[in-house]
Structure formats: C-alpha cells, structure tokens
Image (spheres, rainbow, N blue to C red):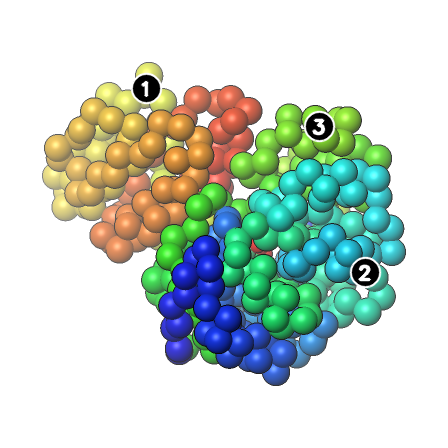
Amino acid sequence: MRVIHVNAQAPERSALREAAELLRGGGLVAFPTETVYGLGANALDANAVDRIYQAKGRPPINPLIVHVSTIAEARALTTNWTLAADRLAGAYWPGPITLVVRKAAHIPDIVTAGGDTVGLRVPGHPVALALIEMAGVPIAAPSANRSNQVSPTTAQHVARGLAGRVDLVIDAGATTIGIESTVVDATGDVPRILRPGMITRDAVARVAGSAEIAATASAGAPRSPGLLERHYAPGARVVLFTPASRDAVMGDARVALDMGRRVGGMLFGGSEQTLTLQVTMPADPDGYARALYAALHQMDDAECDAVLIELPPDTAAWAGVMDRLRRAAA
Ligand code: TXA
Ligand code: MG
C-alpha cells in the first residue's frame, strides 16, 4: 500500500495526479476530508464501488455518500434539487454536511444500496476538493475504516485498518472537524437530521426555516441504515459516566485493575492515577470532536478491556459528539 504525503492547505498537484488516475481507473484511494478520512472510488463505476464494500466488510444495505466539488455537480446527480437542499448547500458547502436527495438514474444502485435517494457532499478540505476536481468524476466515500471500527482522523489510523486493502493513501495530517458530517434528509420541505454532526440542528433550521431530528429506531424501513449499527466502536467495552457516578465507576475500575484488566479513561480532568491509560479531553465541543477518534484509537492500541468516558453536557452544541459516544457504548 502506497502512502503519499501532501500539504493540507496547498496540495502538490503532481502528487494528486497519481491518485486521480487511480480513481479514474477503478482503484481505491483513501484521502482526507475535514471530517474524517474517506475511502474513495469512482461513484459511477459499480465495480469500483463494490471494492469499497469488500475492503470495509460493509453490509450492502448501507448506502455511501457521493462527494463532488461544486453545487452544480451535485445538482446533476439528483432528479429533485429541493429548496431545502439549495439553501443548506449554499450556506454550508464546502463543509461537513451531507444532503440526501432523490437520486439520478445514472448513479449505480450499489452506491445507494438500492434506494432511490443519494447522499451528496462537497467536502471542505483542499485535498479532497482538488482530488475530486482532478479525477473529474463523483467520488463515493465512506469513512476509511473497517466496518464497525473507529473512524480514522489520520493516515496512520487508515493504514491500521485497511493496509493491503486500498491502492493508495493520501496523508495530509490530522483532520480538523474529527467526526463525520451531519446527514440531512433534504427530500422534503422540512429537513430531517439522520445523523448529528458539528453542523447542529439550530444551524440547519436557521438556514432552512425548520429542522427535525429523526428518531434513531423509527418504525418501518430505516432511512439511514448506518444509524442502526454499532458504529465508531473501539474494541473495548465503553462505559459512559457523569460526575454523579464518577466515584462508583472508579471504584469498579480499581477492582477490574486489581484483577489484571486494562482500563482506560477519557476524562475532562482530575487525574485517576491507577488507570492503565488516561487521556484528558478538551472541554469545548469542537476540540472534543477533533480529539475523540484519536483517543479511541489510543485506547485500542493500549489493548484496553474497558474505557471509561466522562460525558459532556447534554446540550445542542454537543449533539454530534454525544451521538458518537452513545454508539461507542451501545
Ligand atoms: O464526514 C463524512 O460523512 C465521511 C467523509 C468521508 O465524507 N463519510 C462518512 O461515510 O461518514 P459513512 O459511509 O461512514 O457514513 C455515511 C452515513 C451512513 O450512516 C449512511 O447510512 C448514511 O450516511 N447515508 C448515506 N446515503 C444515504 C441515503 N441515501 N439515505 C440515508 N442515509 C444515507
Ligand atoms: Mg463510517
């Protein structure tokens, strides 16, 4: 597996040319976006997209996000560019929001898992944008991790999960947002948030007039199959705790440690000397999101049996982070 290094702000075009060629030829290229690293393939090439599912071990019922470099290219991939989609794209693209709209006929069914909608995103990372432009085709890309493992925010994380399963990795350092995009169903008048992210419900409502949050386990067919999976999970058992339960949880941890278990902690402060590994997490949502997956990867590396995570406040600004913590603990 080849790794090429590029400058995150001003990527060297000669380096990206090789990646663009690979994509056009049906290859798999892992590349940075502002959220997490993606595992990209030509979205219009069903065989190439199939390789994504194989490499990740991803269930075929879970649709992929298609990345483009302009709003005009997004509009060419849908039969119904809604007012909500237009307003959200205008306000937040390039950026960490995915818009689900009716799919155009020429998008292969494997991309949308057979569904009649497609998730579209213009990523806000200079490397991703330049790569998509040079490839000249829309790029289907899930997060560049094995299915059900922690998403990658560095090229090293990608290599750990996908070494030997991807043709090329573009390394541009750590991503800045740190958790995946907000996924919004924009097929109707009122946008529905299918996956929370750092673009909040309020930010969606401000631009689109209103916004709903989809129930995670709604009756009937799931609108976002990825919502139903145990995602973003480290190998260890994750225990979430509040200040009120801290003493009890640390007491249990000491018993486990005495039995020879490895117990990690992701805390806001107040060191617990006895833990196998401790990471102090940023107290603001942006900083926390940026640090979250790297901390979970560290817990995996330290072969922790359990990870104790101090919950942030349950406020709107923390909704994206909270969602990932709850999934990690599910
Ligand atoms: O930030 C991100 O979104 C990253 C970067 C690489 O762009 N990508 C990412 O992809 O997180 P993935 O495949 O790991 O997650 C995509 C999510 C899944 O929960 C999937 O079910 C949902 O988006 N999704 C994709 N297409 C959909 C559709 N047509 N309808 C409903 N949900 C969809
Ligand atoms: Mg993913």
Report if the CB atoms under discs 1 and 3 are less than 8 Å apart.
Answer: no
Mark in front: 2 vs 3: 2
Instruction: Identify which residue is drawn at 76% across, 63% down.
Output: 114
Residue 183 seen in the current view? no
Pinpoint residue 259: horizontal percent, then vertical percent: 14, 42
- The residue tagged 3 is 205
The residue lying furthest to the top in this view is 244
Pinpoint residue 153: horizontal percent, then vertical percent: 41, 53
Residue 12 seen in the current view? yes
The tag on residue 243 is 1
User: Residue 110 appears in which quarter of the rendering?
Assistant: bottom right
Inspect the image, locate mark 2, and give the three-letter code of the amino acid beneath it.
Answer: Ala
Inspect the image, locate mark 1, and give the three-letter code of the amino acid beneath it.
Answer: Pro
Which quarter of the figure is the N terminus placed in? bottom left
User: Residue 156 appears in which quarter of the rendering?
Assistant: bottom left
C-alpha separation, residue under disc 2 versus residue under disc 3: 25 Å
Q: Secondary structure at mark 1?
A: helix
Instruction: Identify which residue is drawn at 39% across, 35% down.
Output: 287
- The residue tagged 2 is 76
Pinpoint residue 97: horizontal percent, then vertical percent: 63, 44
Pinpoint residue 102: horizontal percent, then vertical percent: 82, 53
Q: Secondary structure at mark 3?
A: helix
Q: Earlier in the sequence, mark 2 or mark 3?
A: 2
Q: Secondary structure at mark 2?
A: loop
Q: Is residue 211 above or below residue 36?
A: above
Q: Earlier in the sequence, mark 1 or mark 3?
A: 3
Mark 1 and ligand 2: say if the CB distance to the nearest ligand atom is below 8 Å. no
Instruction: Identify which residue is drawn at 62% across, 72% down.
Output: 135
Instruction: Identify which residue is drawn at 58% across, 45% down.
Output: 96
